[in-house]
């Protein structure tokens, strides 16, 4: 009865928009769990990259892991301190995310490889698009399922326009600014040509940075001109990406593990993960503990919280839908 009462109270506070900070999970600490048993002492670590890549952590009473970048960073740090970890499988299931967060994730993988000399292999699951592909480019090899959705190489910026709604409501918005472009991208009016030109310049700069990252990984297979032709924002299946030389192999977890073992010069290893919730992370495909359905936000706001203005390496087909 007490558990039910606590659950109802949390639900009420959450739906009312109240901030709930109750420690019901105990002291946070990463614990190692074995996903694939093997008598070998050496380990291959699986790190999950799930959901939108950003620098904003989970919300709600069960949000303990922090943002995606923080999750990966903490696991890379621990792996670097464990001499028995001999390789990483980065398991990606993400549509991408914030430009800066995606770049930080990429750089942290590069730093880990340089510091430890250990191989990192990307394994793409259902979706590993845009910022997900950007992060995968830091890995020594990319393995994708045949049905994986990947690619979406490009940048998108979203600037909501509520001017029509504001006028219907009868609200008057007055802006006092220090320069003509200080309120560029304002949601309270349409975007002017000179403002659009500024944002297009930023997007083009970020796009060229994306191309440079991918080209450094694929230049032995693709020329820059070929890559630019492929990088028009469209998505590809794993099979298409292989034919276009955007990935290295179509396969499953066993194939990613075999490639990681080969790069690590090992015949066998146990496969492990670091998790706060060992009972949930009990096998390769177990879903991490998430906020219960009662607290979930579904739809576009999952990928692009509140449609806030910003720049994204993100695949969001809902944007611009008629």
Image (cartoon, rainbow, N blue to C red):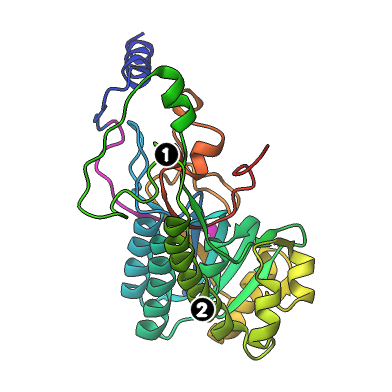
**Residue 299: image tag:** none
Which x, y percent locates residue 181?
A: 32, 55
Relative vertical location of residue 165 with respect to residue 38 in this rendering, above or below: above
Residue name at image x 28 percent, y 53 percent: 182
**Residue labelled with disc 1:** 189
Which x, y percent locates residue 283?
A: 57, 51
**Residue labelled with disc 2:** 213
Q: Is residue 35 left or right of residue 234?
A: left
Q: Nearer the viewer, residue 274 or 121?
A: 121
Task: Single out the mark in the foreground, 2 or 1.
Answer: 1
Q: Look at the image and give the residue range highlighted in magenta.
A: 24-35
Which x, y percent locates residue 19?
A: 26, 27
Marks 2/1: CA–CA distance: 36 Å
Marks 2/1 in contact by CB < 8 Å: the verdict is no
Which x, y percent locates residue 179?
A: 24, 55
Q: Is residue 242 left or right of residue 35?
A: right
Residue at the top extreme, as displayed: 1
First along the sequence among labels 2 and 1 = 1
Q: Nearer the viewer, residue 2 or 306?
A: 306
Question: How many numbered badges does the structure rendering display?
Answer: 2
Question: Is 133 inside the magenta-drawn segment?
Answer: no
Asked if residue 37 can be seen in this view, the reply is: no
Label 2: state its secondary structure. Answer: helix
Residue name at image x 52 percent, y 81 percent: 212
Q: Nearer the viewer, residue 301 or 110?
A: 301
Category of crowding for the residue at label 2, using alpha-carbon neighbours closer than 10 angstroms: few (below 14), some (14–19), many (at least 20): some
Asked if residue 108 can be seen in this view, the reply is: yes
């Amino acid at each position: 009865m007490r558990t039910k009462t606590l659950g109802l109270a949390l639900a009420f506070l959450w739906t009312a928009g109240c901030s709930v900070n109750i420690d019901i999970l105990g002291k946070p600490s990463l614990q190692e769990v074995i996903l694939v048993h093997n008598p070998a002492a050496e380990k291959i670590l699986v790190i999950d990259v799930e959901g939108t890549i950003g620098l904003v952590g989970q919300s709600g009473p069960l949000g303990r892991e922090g943002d995606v970048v923080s999750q990966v960073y903490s696991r890379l740090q621990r792996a670097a301190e464990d001499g028995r970890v001999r390789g990483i499988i980065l398991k990606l299931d993400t549509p991408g995310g914030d430009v800066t967060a995606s770049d930080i994730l990429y750089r942290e993988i590069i730093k880990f490889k340089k510091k430890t000399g250990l191989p990192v292999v990307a394994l793409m699951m259902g979706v590993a698009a845009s910022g997900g592909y950007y992060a995968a480019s830091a890995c020594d090899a990319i393995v994708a399922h045949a049905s994986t959705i990947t690619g979406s190489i490009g940048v998108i910026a979203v600037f909501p326009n509520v001017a029509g709604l504001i006028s219907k409501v009868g609200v008057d918005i007055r802006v006092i600014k220090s320069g003509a472009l200080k309120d560029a991208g304002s949601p309270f009016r349409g975007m002017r040509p000179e403002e659009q030109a500024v944002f297009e310049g930023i997007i083009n700069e970020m796009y060229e940075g994306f191309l440079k990252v991918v080209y450094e990984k694929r230049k032995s297979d693709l020329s820059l001109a070929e890559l630019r032709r492929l990088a028009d924002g469209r998505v590809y299946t794993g099979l298409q990406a292989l034919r276009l030389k955007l990935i290295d192999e179509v396969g499953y977890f066993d194939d990613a593990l075999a490639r990681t073992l080969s790069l690590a010069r090992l015949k066998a290893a146990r496969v492990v993960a670091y998790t706060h919730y060992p009972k949930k992370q009990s096998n390769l495909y177990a879903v991490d503990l998430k906020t219960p359905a009662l607290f979930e936000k579904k739809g576009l706001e999952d990928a692009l919280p509140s449609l806030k203005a910003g720049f994204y390496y993100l695949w969001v087909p809902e944007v611009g839908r008629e």
